[in-house]
Image (cartoon, grey):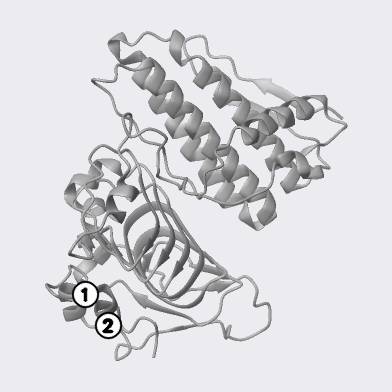
Amino acid sequence: METQVQTATHTHDPWAATHQVILQPAIMDPKQRFYHHFLKSVTVLQDLIDGLPSIASVGGERQEAIDHILASIAKLQNEVADAADYTPSYDRKQYSETIKTLQDKLNETITRIAPKSKFQFRRAKTNHVDMGAPENDPRLNPGSHSRAKHDAAIITGIANSLPTNKEDTLSELPSKEAYKNYNEEMKRPSPSSIRKPSFSAAKNIGISNHSNLHIILPSSASRATSSGSLTDLEGCIIDMSIPTTEGSAFPGLAIKNVSKSLIVGGRVNGAVHITGVSDSIIVVVARQVRIHECSNVDIYLHCGSHPIIEDCSGMRFAPLPTPYRTETEELDENQWDQVDDFKWLKAGHSPNWTTLSENERLGDDLWRSVVPGQPGVSVEEALKKLNIPRK
């Protein structure tokens, strides 16, 4: 059976193609349904990117088109994360790589058509993953669907164009002349372990592949909070509270592959996805928190819904520390201790999580003195003061 597509036609809407409603066969399971939705979204986004050079740059029309594409990519990325309950991890890796390549294609197009003297653009955040080519997965070649065949070929072409440089990470960019590489800047040798990257030339915050660094985002990063991601970090302190308090909150935040670190994630209007974190402390304000494959993590949290854990152990929860609270947190309900363990189906409390008593929680003085950095104190010494890793 062919997948049917209905298009809601809007005469005055230049983005009518993105308002398509896909009618899937009733027997199609959620995984297949999302797969077809993803393919259709990728096709639409490719067409929009290809059409950018034909849009006039005067009157803000081209910038409006670029902003629309960025928002659509971010939405698709969030949909991939939200579909984690019914999509295999290998599929999610393929989806993430395809999104990453869409972002690369958008950046390359923008660089080609924009006056270099006036514009600088950065790649939106994405979770960097290692994967095989999509054509190797039979699930991405549903032979009975002619439209799906066409779309699968599109994804194959995208994946084949991925960079092979192992140093290519989620916010490292292909051209220093066109973009500023903040990850590379933070890696440069310095007498101090403290880094304060401005992210003033960025639209997104992506911090990856660091160890033994104390990274504090200043207020200048407040314009770069359209998305956020932290990946592959060890023995680090990351504080993103300032830009998300003084500026806009992240619409979504991804934290992945982090060990022996403190992460102050700031404020997130949507969901926080925490995956593969161990022996660490996380502080965050969010509407939704989903935690997968984590161990021995203390989470200081203000959450507007039940936090969700899956395949986790040794998780401990506490309310948001006083130094990070605002009037908003004082007024809104905090469900930090209403944790749902999706892998614990028996009666009684899950053994995989507990709450921290007041005596076990870090004191306000530590949050105020250690997290902002102290002269002559190394990252390792600061982490010990914060009891990272747990004794």
Q: Which residue is identified by label 1?
A: 367
Residue 356's label in the rendered image is none
- What distance separates the C-alpha of mark 1 from that of mark 2? 8 Å
Which of the pair 345/146 is nearer the observer?
Answer: 146
The residue under label 1 is which amino acid type?
Trp
Mark 2 surroundings: few (<14), some (14-19) or many (≥20) residues within 10 A: some
**Residue type at the position of mark 2:** Leu
Q: Is residue 322 left or right of residue 302?
A: left
Q: Can you give x and y, in whole percent of width and height, for residue 93 in the image?
A: 62, 49
In the image, what residue occupies the spot 43% across and 28% down?
Answer: 107
Which residue is the extreme one toward the left? 375
The one of 364 and 184 positioned closer to us in this rendering: 184
Q: Is residue 367 left or right of residue 113?
A: left
* Residue 365 x, y percent position in the rendering: 16, 80
Picture layout, residue 169 above or below residue 23: below
Q: Nearer the viewer, residue 313 or 102?
A: 102
Q: Residue at x 33, y 34 (%)?
A: 176
Residue 104: x and y, percent?
A: 48, 32
Whether residues under marks 1 and 2 lie with C-beta atoms below 8 angstroms apart, the answer is yes
Question: Which residue, given by chain and number where applicable, does mark 2 sit on?
Answer: 362
Tell me the quadrant of the picture where the N terminus can be found.
top right
- Could you tell whether 219 is left or right of 240 in the image? left
Q: Is residue 288 above or below residue 102?
A: below
Q: Quadrant of the C terminus?
A: bottom left
